Image (spheres, rainbow, N blue to C red):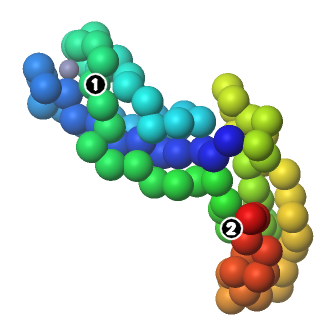
Amino acid sequence: MAWFLNFYRCDRCRRMWTDEWSCTCDDECPHCGFRNMSPFNSEDLTELIVEEAGKFVVLRSPEEAEDDPDYQELGRFSTRDAAKEFLRSHQPD
Ligand SMILES: [Zn+2]
């Protein structure tokens, strides 16, 4: 299961919002309640690099995740470049 940050724009009130889901699924407008809005853009958050206490931590959302990304730590690196390099060389099949 991947994890996505979805971007929505309401057809009725024209306001925008974002939400995180395990798919690029429809959502309800938090401003006016208009339903079944499809995302106009999605960012894949399955793999993330976050900075923590001066280290760069590589996280991945496992296949089983559904309601929550349930990130698992794959490694810690002293530079962001090292973390990116690790991700490049550890792509799932
Ligand atoms: Zn709306």
Q: In this view, does 9 lie to the left or right of 48?
A: left
Q: What element carries label 2?
A: strand
Residue 88 seen in this snapshot: yes
Instruction: Point out residue 17 in the picture as x, y percentages from the top left corner.
Output: 33, 35
Q: In this view, does 51 lie to the left or right of 30?
A: right
Q: From the viewer's perspective, is residue 52 above or below residue 64?
A: below
Question: Could you tell me how far apart the alpha carbons at marks 1 and 2 are, in whole angstroms?
Answer: 29 Å
Residue 83 seen in this snapshot: no
Q: Mark 1 points at which residue?
A: 37
User: Which mark sits nearer the N-terminus, 1 or 2?
Assistant: 1
Instruction: Point out residue 28 in the picture as x, y percentages from the top left corner.
Output: 34, 18
| Front disc: 1 or 2 | 1
Q: From the viewer's perspective, is residue 18 above or below residue 42?
A: above
Q: Quadrant of the N terminus?
A: top right
Q: In which quarter of the image is residue 16?
A: top left
Q: Name the residue under label 2.
A: 49
Task: Name the residue type under label 1.
Answer: Met
Q: Are there few (<14), some (14-19), or many (20+) residues within 10 Å of tag 2?
A: many
Q: Is residue 3 left or right of residue 83?
A: left
Instruction: Point out residue 20 in the picture as x, y percentages from the top left corner.
Output: 52, 37
Q: Quadrant of the C terminus?
A: bottom right
Q: From the viewer's perspective, is residue 43 above or below residue 13?
A: below
Residue at 32% over, 37% down:
39
Q: In this view, does 38 lie to the left or right of 64?
A: left
Name the residue nearer the viewer: 10 or 54.
Answer: 10
Q: Quadrant of residue 60?
A: bottom right
Residue at 82% over, 85% down:
78
Residue at 58% over, 53% down:
45
Disc 1 residue lies near ligand 1 with CB under 8 A: yes
Q: In which quarter of the image is residue 25?
A: top left
